[in-house]
Amino acid sequence: MAEKTLKDLGNGFIEVVTSVKDGEKTVPLKYQVPKGYKELFAWAVSLPATNEAAGKTDGKQNPSQEWIYDRYCYAADLKERANVRESVAAESTTVMVGGKPFDLLSLSDLKAVQAVNANFLWSATTGKETAKAAIVARRKLIEAGRAVEGDGGMLKVAKK
């Protein structure tokens, strides 16, 4: 996480100085935000209602109440998308094989059980963390009745 420096500008705003990393490149970032919600509301009501009324300077839109609303909706959308990505990733049964995504549950019952067991054995012998996809795949195989727990917690293909 990039370090943030905050500076009170004394006019109801705080200047935030940080950086954004994109691959190997780090780009400096500086912006201003209202000091608190009271300052935000005081600033917002002083603005023109529409983007058209606010006009443009140097090709950039001046803030307006409409602009603030658009930014609020955009931020809410990003937050909700991030929450969904986290929950999807937490339930993923996809692993990377040779740099390509591969879903463990797309395998036959026998091969899926073998892949999950192999990951748990590898983890036990190396002391490294078990892949989250293997943990999720194990649970889903049992829930779907494709596998049952055998001796020592290893999976076995369920008899049909």
Image (tube, rainbow, N blue to C red):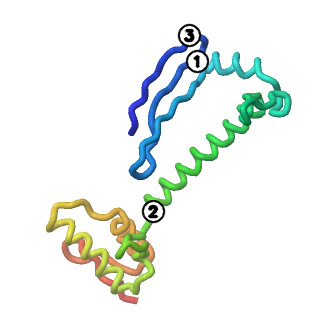
In the rendered image, the quadrant that contains the N terminus is top left
Q: Which mark is residue 13?
A: 1
Local SS, label 1 = strand
Residue 54 higher or lower than 87, as above or below: above
Residue type (three-letter) at the residue carrying disc 1: Phe
Residue 34 point in image, percent of width and height: 60, 21
Residue type (three-letter) at the residue carrying disc 2: Glu
Upstream in the sequence, badge 2 or badge 3?
Answer: 3
Q: How far, Cα to Cα, is label 1 from label 3?
A: 7 Å
Residue 69 visible, this angle = no
Residue 157 point in image, percent of width and height: 33, 84
Residue 19 higher or lower than 8, as above or below: below
Local SS, label 2 = loop
134 to the left or right of 74? left
Q: How far, Cα to Cα, is label 2 from label 3?
A: 47 Å
Q: Name the residue that disc number 3 marks.
A: 10
Q: Which one is nearer the viewer's eye here, 160 or 121?
A: 121
Q: Which one is nearer the viewer's eye here, 106 or 97?
A: 97
Front of the two marks 2 and 1: 1
Residue 130 point in image, percent of width and height: 27, 63
Residue 122 point in image, percent of width and height: 20, 70
Q: How many marks?
A: 3
Give the residue displayed 78% in from the left and 33% down from the top.
Answer: 66
Q: Which one is nearer the viewer's eye here, 24 or 160?
A: 24
In the rendered image, the quadrant that contains the C terminus is bottom left
How many residues crowd around disc 1 within 10 Å: few (fewer than 14), some, or many (20 or more)? some
Q: Name the residue that disc number 2 marks.
A: 91
Q: How far, Cα to Cα, is label 2 from label 1?
A: 41 Å
Residue 159 higher or lower than 86, as above or below: below
Upstream in the sequence, badge 2 or badge 1?
Answer: 1
Give the residue displayed 74% in from the left and 33% down from the top.
Answer: 61
Residue 151 higher or lower than 6, as above or below: below
